[in-house]
Image (cartoon, rainbow, N blue to C red):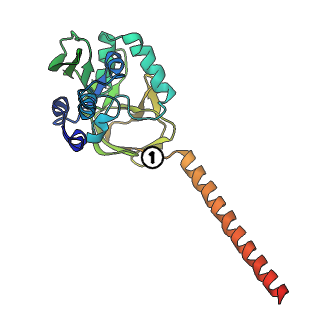
């Protein structure tokens, strides 16, 4: 394809994701394969990298990656990844963890044999296999948990009504008190309110967010308000003030010199 088409056109593999907009995950085997790109021409190599889910390419079309996008990944994410998927591990436990994290599509360089996975595409190019699966056991991005001797999940008790980079709003309706789970990374700076009352966010499996909710209907809002933002704003205002004060002093000195010279 032409270079402009490389950036605008959807590869066949992406078209499986398009109707659902589901979160996807590529296994360590794919990450290792994608360290080298092949192609008959430069554009062909770019297209091959995009079609193979090489880092950051899916972001152009707003597909959600399990890993997120960070120039430097948070330590909690890296510890979670190494502890669960390091050395190419991918078994029943890993699939269950991805299902709980709202991962609907999985890309692998080796075939995966799980009844929950439906093969959507088997691509073989430049001596490399890419298998794209749909995870039919995927859980919603948010739901309510009722802990006890036997943990119960209400997958229909919560629905996202606003989804923005710095804010997520969820409508909850439950017959008894429980814990609202959100499969988004826990990170300092995120705050939560239940019906405009601040609540503390706790970590779920060391990585995701959860807050307590009472029975009934509620609106839960997560908003990103890092203290660093306000601290940076204060420093910027103080710096601007010092610059303006310096300009005023310099101007008065010039006026004084001019007056003395007369």
Q: What residue lies at 35% left-to-right and 21% top-to-bottom?
A: 31
- What SS does tag 1 mark? strand
Image quarter of the C terminus: bottom right
Left or right relative to 148: residue 234: right
Q: Which is nearer the eye, 230 or 140? A: 230
Q: Can residue 11 be seen in this view?
A: yes
- Where does residue 32 sit, x and y in percent of width and height? 36, 18
Q: Which is nearer the eye, 56 or 34? A: 34
Left or right relative to 173: residue 194: right
- Where does residue 203 sit, x and y in percent of width and height? 46, 28
Q: Mark 1 points at which residue?
A: 197
Q: In which quarter of the image is residue 60?
A: top left
Q: Which is nearer the eye, 44 or 240? A: 44
Above or below, comparing residue 61 to residue 31 in the picture = below
Q: Can residue 219 be seen in this view?
A: no
Q: Quadrant of residue 243?
A: bottom right
């Amino acid at each position: 394809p032409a270079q402009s088409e490389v950036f605008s056109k959807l590869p066949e593999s992406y078209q499986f994701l398009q109707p659902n907009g589901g979160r996807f995950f590529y296994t360590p085997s794919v990450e290792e394969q994608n360290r080298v790109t092949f192609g008959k021409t430069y554009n062909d190599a770019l297209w091959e990298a995009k079609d193979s889910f090489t880092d950051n390419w899916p972001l152009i079309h707003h597909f959600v990656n399990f890993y997120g996008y960070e120039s430097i990944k948070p330590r909690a994410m890296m510890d979670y990844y190494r502890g669960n998927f390091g050395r190419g591990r991918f078994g029943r436990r890993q699939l269950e963890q991805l299902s709980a994290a709202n991962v609907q599509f999985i890309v692998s360089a080796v075939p995966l044999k799980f009844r929950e996975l439906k093969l959507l595409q088997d691509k073989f190019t430049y001596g490399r296999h890419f298998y794209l699966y749909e995870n039919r056991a995927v859980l919603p991005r948010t739901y309510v948990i009722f802990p006890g001797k036997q943990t119960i999940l209400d997958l229909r008790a919560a629905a996202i009504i606003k989804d923005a980079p710095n804010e997520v709003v969820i409508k909850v309706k439950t017959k008894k008190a429980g814990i609202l789970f959100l499969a988004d990374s826990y990170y300092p700076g995120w705050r939560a309110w239940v019906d405009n009352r601040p609540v503390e966010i706790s970590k779920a499996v060391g990585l995701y967010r959860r807050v307590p909710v009472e029975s009934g209907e509620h609106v839960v809002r997560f908003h990103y308000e890092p203290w660093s933002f306000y601290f940076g704003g204060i420093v910027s205002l103080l710096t601007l003030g010092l610059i303006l004060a310096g300009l005023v002093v310099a101007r008065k000195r010039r006026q004084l010199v001019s007056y003395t010279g007369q």
